[in-house]
Image (cartoon, rainbow, N blue to C red):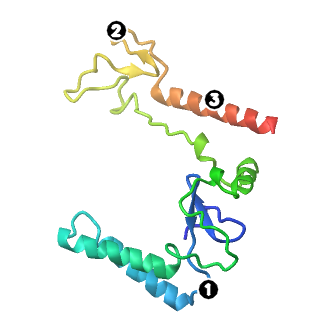
Amino acid sequence: MREDYPITPDGRYFVIRGRLWRMSNPALDIAVRDALVVRLMNARRSLRRDAPLEGRAAARAEVDAVKRQLGERGDVWWTDSAPDMNRRLVENTPYRAWFDELQTSNEIVATRRTVCLIAIPTRPFGKGNIMSQSGQQHPKADVGGQRADPKKSDNKKGATDSVRETIDSGKKAVAKSDAKK
């Protein structure tokens, strides 16, 4: 399992995008667990789009059976009669305080702060403007949030500058929120 997913203090769940997912039974023998994981991956490969339709129902049943043997589905593997919180949002479970503490201590990256930036280069061919497929400047090329004017050569702000400004403003906002804590 990837190590960047936080695991609850009792070792029962890991968290992905704010949702709890049950861990495999740690009491399983390593060789048994590895054999089950191989079976699970084979069954999942059978579910790919290029797999025959008639085999998919059997593959789904195999995935479910293996996950139950691993302890990820079905009856819980712990013995203290605690309820199963599998697939629930962390904020709606007793693990909420633990997860909030993780987020504030920056031990995990909060998904709410994740920003995706897509930069379109303004000089893809070493020339000064965005080009169309025909090799001419696109008439509605947007350079750095401003309309590019082919007659003016003072369009100095490019897309990469806008991306840098966006990243810098994001860093300042994160720094401010961290300073308040």
Residue kind at label 2, given as amino acid type: Lys
Q: Which residue is mark 1?
A: 27
The residue sitting at 55% across, 52% down in the picture is 17
Q: Secondary structure at mark 1?
A: loop
**Left or right: residue 137 compared with residue 116:** left
- Mark 3 or mark 1, which is nearer to you? 1
Q: From the viewer's perspective, is residue 63 above or below residue 143?
A: below
Q: Residue at x 64, y 78 (%)?
A: 78
In space, the residues marked 3 and 1 are separated at their CA atoms by 48 Å
* Dot 2 crowding, Cα within 10 Å, few <14, some 14–19, many 20+: few
Q: Position of residue 60 (x, y in %)?
A: 33, 71
Label 1 crowd (10 A; few <14 / some 14-19 / many >=20): few
Q: Which mark is residue 151?
A: 2
Disc 2 element? loop
- The secondary element bearing badge 3 is classed as helix
Badge 3 crowding class, 10 Å Cα cut-off, few under 14, some 14 to 19, many 20 or more, is: few
Say left or right for 72 vs 5. left
Foreground of the two, 79 or 121: 79
Query: Residue flagged by tag 1: what amino acid is it?
Result: Ala
Disc number placed over residue 169 in the picture, else none = 3
CA–CA distance in space, label 2 to label 1: 72 Å
Figure quadrant of residue 164: top right
| Callout in the foreground (2, 3) | 3
Q: Along the polypeptide, which appears first: circle 3 or circle 1?
A: 1
Q: Earlier in the sequence, mark 2 or mark 3?
A: 2
Residue at image coords 72%, 67%: 9
